[in-house]
Amino acid sequence: MDTAASIINELTDSAQTDEEALNDAVIIGLLASSDEDSLAELAVWLKENATTLAPLVTRAAAEKPGLSGEASCAVLDALLLKPLADEDVTVRLMGECLRVIAARITASLSEDAPGADNLHDDPLVSSTVAVVTAGRRAHLSETAVSYLAKAGSGGSLVLARSFDTLRDSLKLHVLRRLKPADVWVLGGNVVASLGNSISTLIEGLEGKPLRIAVKFLEGLDPEAHSESSDIDPAEPLAVGAHVFHASWGAGSVVKTGKGTIKVDFGSAGTRTLMRKFATLRHA
């Protein structure tokens, strides 16, 4: 009798384990999806399992095809609505989701894709802006800003688009973390819009906050990016030399070749340029 009961218990446990594994696989599949139906199912699951989502999101991020940008936005929204008991885990998941989203937006800003102006109505940009500006958890919004400021041109675009709707203290947090050169990569319209917003902000500031905003605004001045004359294509450039490109901002030479130069432009990426055609200035 005991043996039979033991066998039944083992079979039951095995069935439960298999069912749980199947459910986990389904959720991991949803976290990799971007279609509307899958995202609707994911939203329901996130609402019901907000406090236990961490292990599956972590697994999804580590497996192929990984987290989708759209699913990452849904996870971020769930985290802001109901942070996990372990704040370190909340922050780690937030960083992972923002990394995925910013990478997707950065890819959309590559030289072979539309520029920042054409991403104005991009759902991924809009969703991430909504997360940053939600204001439900102040300290998590600051954490999101810090991650995005270090996340390349995609993160910079989200912060530039978010700026007008942020509270003043969070605007200053953006100006402390974001680099003017990273905004320049996004093009003239984004630069002009952010510059106008900062000029309006300055009117109500004084002391250290005023100095922070003025310093950033000065960094957006075109003259700050064109102080030196163009570098002659025949001029030797050693590894480590600092240069400036109108589209990609300040960078440092990491490799030179016959007629080519490889430059690390930080958040704008590493580019290999033909010296004959590249317009560079001394930084």
Image (cartoon, helix red, strand yellow):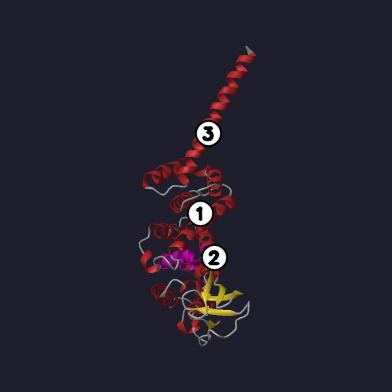
Identify which amino acid the numbered label 1 is placed on: Cys
Dot 2 or dot 1: first in sequence order is 1
Task: Look at the picture and state if 26 lies above or below 74.
Answer: above
Q: Residues within 10 Å of mark 2 (few under 14, many from 20)?
A: some
* Contact between labelled residues 3 and 2, with CB atoms less than 8 Å apart: no
Q: Nearer the viewer, residue 124 or 47?
A: 124
Identify which amino acid the numbered label 2 is placed on: Lys
Identify which amino acid the numbered label 3 is placed on: Glu
- Reading the image, the residue beneath label 2 is 150
Q: Residues within 10 Å of mark 1 (few under 14, many from 20)?
A: many
Q: Residue at x 43, y 62 (%)?
A: 108
Task: Look at the picture and state if 232 lies above or below 153.
Answer: below
Residue 53, position in %: x, y?
52, 44
Dot 1 or dot 3: first in sequence order is 3
Dot 2 or dot 3: first in sequence order is 3
- Reading the image, the residue beneath label 1 is 97
